Structure formats: C-alpha cells, structure tokens
C-alpha cells in the first residue's frame, strides 16, 4: 500500500461533495467524524468535504497509535498535514471543533499553504486559569481530579463530562451519544488525548496565525466562556467572532443551522 493510501486508511478518511473548494472537518476530543453529520448535507452541496478520525478515535486504525506521537497536540496536527498531503490539498478551508481549532492552527502555521482560512467552533487555546490575566475555565487541581476520575471510573467520568460538554439543556439523545463516544474510545488513549487537550497552553500560538479566522462561540459553554472567544479574536490578526445564542460546546451538533450561514459566508 502506498504511503498516501496508508494514511487515508489509518485516519478513516472519507470524501463527500464535489465543490471546487475543499473543507477539512476535524472533530474534537472524544468524538469522531460522525459528529459533523448535521452540517455536512448542506455543506456538501457547495464544497468537497474531507472527513477523518484522529488515530485512536472513531474507526481509525488504532494499531497506529503511539503515546510518543500523540502525547501532545502536535502529533494530531501531523495527522492533518499527512491527510492533506495524501490528498494533494492546498488552500483548503479548515473547520475544527474545540481542541481541533488549535490542532488545525498548529498545522496551518507549520504549512501555511495547506489552508487559506480557518473556522474554529467553540475553541480554547488553554482550559487553565492563570489569574488575573486569563481565565480558561478550570483550576489545575480540578482538571487533574477530572483526569484522575478517568482512571478510577471511566464510565462515571464519561457520564459526568458528556452533559457538561453538550450542554444540559440539549437533547438527552445527543448527550447520550457523546457519552457513548467517550466510552467507545480506548481509556488509555482518551486519557493521553485529554491531558494534551486540557493541560496545555497554546495561547502563544494565536499571534502566529496569518490566515483569516472565523470563531464561532457559544453564549453558554461550560468549557469555554465567551471571554475565551474574545481573547482568541484579539490575538489573531484577521479574525471575526460570532457569538451564537446557544448552550453547550458542540454548536455543530446542537445548533447546526445557526453556524451554517456564518460558515458558508466565510468560506466563499
């Protein structure tokens, strides 16, 4: 198997739609490409869409997982770069959910020709609080306690985190789906991805982003307050912040129609 094909199999890459512009959709922590299904029917009418699963997520080839590579977000950015190379992509538009906003930014800074624009859905460059200058939402002790719960009671951790992420006011089906997605991920891989996600600080990276960037923020998000979106917008030179009247951290699942208009306008 050629290296390109191996990458496409490894990351369970799927291509849909047939527009002249390509969108690369990158799922968040504990999720997979299926989470984009509420926005893809509309987007594929206008764009070619690349869907994939990070190694260790969804239907990716878990045998390719390495703690060394995926112990930090740069390893996941390598997945994105390799997928784009395998598909000979340049000037694509990257759409990342949550931590994937930062993973995509890492890839975009390393290989500026890959992406002409970035869309960040509920992003956060840092979930930690550094008072008085920055409030990412969590004290380090609380995050360490949450990560320890993954070892002690993984199902309990998933059932605690899912409603927090999806937003308690949203449907029980979606909360249940996210909890199930967490539970279907290998706990060792999930813990490593969680540490890379929740204990990292990529605030310094934002100033290096040269691509125009659309930030889609939820008005009530237990994981990323609107002040985080405002911080990101203030750090990225060419950015536009849209705050959506919504609850939760998964706008592409709970409020797809609210973000589709913004994405379509920005991606044109």
Image: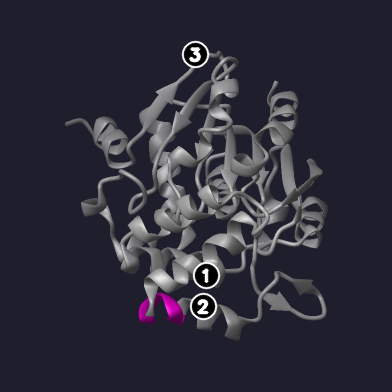
Closest to the observer: 261 or 198?
261
Label 3 or label 1, whichever lies nearer to me, is 1
How far is the residue under mark 2 from the one under mark 1?
9 Å
Query: Which residue has dot 1 on it?
Result: 160
Q: In which quarter of the image is residue 149?
A: bottom left
Q: Mark 2 vs mark 3: which is more N-terminal? A: 3
Q: 250 above or below 36?
A: below
How far is the residue under mark 2 from the one under mark 3?
42 Å
Residue 146's label in the rendered image is 2
As drawn, the residue found furthest toward the front would be 172
Query: Which residue has dot 3 on it?
Result: 18
Residue 184 point in image, percent of width and height: 34, 56
Q: Which segment is the magenta one? A: 148-152
How far is the residue under mark 3 from the one under mark 1?
40 Å
> In what element is the residue under mark 1?
helix
Residue 214 point in image, percent of width and height: 73, 39
Residue at horizontal 66%, vertical 53%? 123
Residue at horizontal 58%, vertical 36%? 94
Asked if the residue under mark 1 is in contact with the one under mark 2, i.e. CB atoms within 8 Å, the reply is yes
Residue 131 point in image, percent of width and height: 78, 81
Residue 84 point in image, percent of width and height: 44, 33
Residue at horizontal 73%, vertical 44%? 215
In the rendered view of the protein, which quadrant contains the C terminus? top right
């Amino acid at each position: 198997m050629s290296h390109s094909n191996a990458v496409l199999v490894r990351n369970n890459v799927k291509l849909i739609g047939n527009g002249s512009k390509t969108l690369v959709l990158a799922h968040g922590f504990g999720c997979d490409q299926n989470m984009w299904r509420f926005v893809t029917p509309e987007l594929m009418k206008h764009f070619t869409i690349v869907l994939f699963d990070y190694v260790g997520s969804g239907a990716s080839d878990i045998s390719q997982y390495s703690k060394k590579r995926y112990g930090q977000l740069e390893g996941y950015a390598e997945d994105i770069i390799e997928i784009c190379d395998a598909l000979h992509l340049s000037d694509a538009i990257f759409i990342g959910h949550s931590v994937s906003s930062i993973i995509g930014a890492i890839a975009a800074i390393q290989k500026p020709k890959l992406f002409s624009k970035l869309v960040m859905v509920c992003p956060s460059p840092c979930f930690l609080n550094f008072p008085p200058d920055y409030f990412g939402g969590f004290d380090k002790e609380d995050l360490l306690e949450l990560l320890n719960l993954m070892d002690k009671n993984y199902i309990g951790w998933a059932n605690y985190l899912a409603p927090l992420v999806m937003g308690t006011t949203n449907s029980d089906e979606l909360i249940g789906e996210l909890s199930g997605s967490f539970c279907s991920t290998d706990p060792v891989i999930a813990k490593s991805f969680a540490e890379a996600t929740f204990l990292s600080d990529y605030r310094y990276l934002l100033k290096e982003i040269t691509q125009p960037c659309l930030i889609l923020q939820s008005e009530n998000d237990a994981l990323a307050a609107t002040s985080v979106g405002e911080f990101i917008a203030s750090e990225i030179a060419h950015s536009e912040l849209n705050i959506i009247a919504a609850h939760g951290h998964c706008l592409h699942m709970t409020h797809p129609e609210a973000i589709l208009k913004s994405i379509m306008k920005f991606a044109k």
